[in-house]
Amino acid sequence: MKKILYLLIIFLVGQTAFGASPKKSYVIGFYNLENLFDTYHDEGKNDYEYLPDGANNWTEVKYEKKLQNMASVIRAMRDDNNVYHAILGVSEIENRHVLDDLVNRPEIADANYQIVHYDGPDRRGVDVALFYRPDVFQLLESKSIPFDFNSNIDFGMTQEEKDDFRTRDILMVRGLLGGEMFAFLVAHLPSRVGGKSNDLRSRGGEIMYAEAMRLMDEYPGIKIVAMGDMNDNPTDDSMAIYMHGKEKIKDVGERDFFSPFLSMLKDGYGSLAYQGEWNIYDIILANHNLVNAPKGTLEITPIVKGKYYGRIFQKPFMTQQEGDYKGTPFRTYSGGAFIGGYSDHYPTYIVVSTK
């Protein structure tokens, strides 16, 4: 009997040691933090409304409340998924200081998030950044890609207007996720304010796509995730044409991207509401190598009832419960008054897992 039990133990140990590797699964997401400013002036930036004597009377108490709220959402996503995001892109952040303050909040300090951030040229001083968990992601390279007008798009702008234009850079981060080569592009494309902005966002999509193709040519097989507040829906030109975003995986060619939030938009979902209409500006796209991955490697997987490949994360505490904006994201300010909310955007994410 002892011999049989011994042989059974040896068999089970052998299965663990030499059998299939444990399944890997990682959450990759994006969150617009809606004006995460500190209370100090950054030289050369138009951040005056977010100072203690500014229009928003932005005090240390309000700043600490904002940090707590943002950390609480990130923690709530961790509790929902039983794991912190491996990668989390963020936008509307002022500087490295606010990022450090956020990742060190007690609600999420145990994630040990590391930061990739560059100061950009946006006149208000808001940038994009990326958080990553060093236990699962090895950083190899990063860079900040500036917006330019080197395009065949007719912007309808004078040279003086082009020279004066400032917007957020696009962040590129490359490294190893679960031992596989990945690149992440994080963007906050130009606002919809102004009649010429559609062409500017199309140019933003064109810049992102060109960088993605460069990476694919230089690193065959690389898996790429593009994410950001695109200020456009997945159906708009910047995403559908210039980023080659496809609704169905079967339609994703080798130089295309899968756009998982496109079908969700068509089904009435939204990450933000404007004038009573839901939109999904917080978009995540996956390249062909991630949606048609070799067996045993990481690929995008459905996460909502087996139907959708993306999730818009919303909880009652993140949602306005009364008033004219009931049912929409519970924001920081409303009508010029501080209401202590979270963000005017819901975060979005995808999951990648081994087959």
Image (cartoon, rainbow, N blue to C red):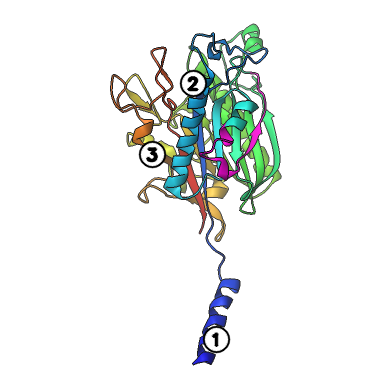
What residue is rendered at 58% in x and 36% in y? 103
Crowd band around label 1 with a 10 angstrom C-alpha radius: few (<14), some (14–19), many (20+): few
Residue 292 visible within the image: no
Q: Quadrant of residue 217?
A: top right
* Residue drawn at (64%, 10%) of the image: 164
x and y percentages locating residue 107 in the rendered image: 50, 39
Say whether residue 81 is left or right of residue 142.
Answer: left
User: What type is the residue that disc 3 sits on?
Assistant: Ser
Residue of label 1: 6
Residue situated in front as seen by the camera: 29 or 101: 101
Percent from the top left, x then y, of residue 108? 53, 40
Mark-to-mark CA distance, 2 and 3:
37 Å
Locate residue 131: give its quadrant.
top right
Disc 2 versus disc 1: distance between alpha carbons? Answer: 63 Å
Q: Secondary structure at mark 1?
A: helix
Q: Is residue 127 above or below residue 243?
A: above
Amino acid at circle 2: Lys
Q: Viewer-nearest of labels 1 and 3?
A: 1
**Which of disc 3 and disc 2 is earlier in sequence?**
2
Give the total number of marks visible in the rendering.
3
Quadrant in the picture for residue 326: top left
Region of the chain picked out in magenta, as a range: 102-121
Residue 62's tag is: 2
Q: Nearer the viewer, mark 2 or mark 1?
A: 2
Residue indicated by mark 3 = 263
Question: Of the residues tagged 2 and 3, which is closer to the observer?
Answer: 2
Of pointers 1 and 3, the one earlier in the residue sequence: 1
Q: Magenta stretch: residue 114 in it?
A: yes
Residue beneath the point at 61% across and 50% down? 136
Q: Residue at x 57, y 82 (%)?
A: 10
Q: Residues within 10 Å of mark 3 (few under 14, many from 20)?
A: some
- Residue 345: image location, x then y, percent: 43, 28
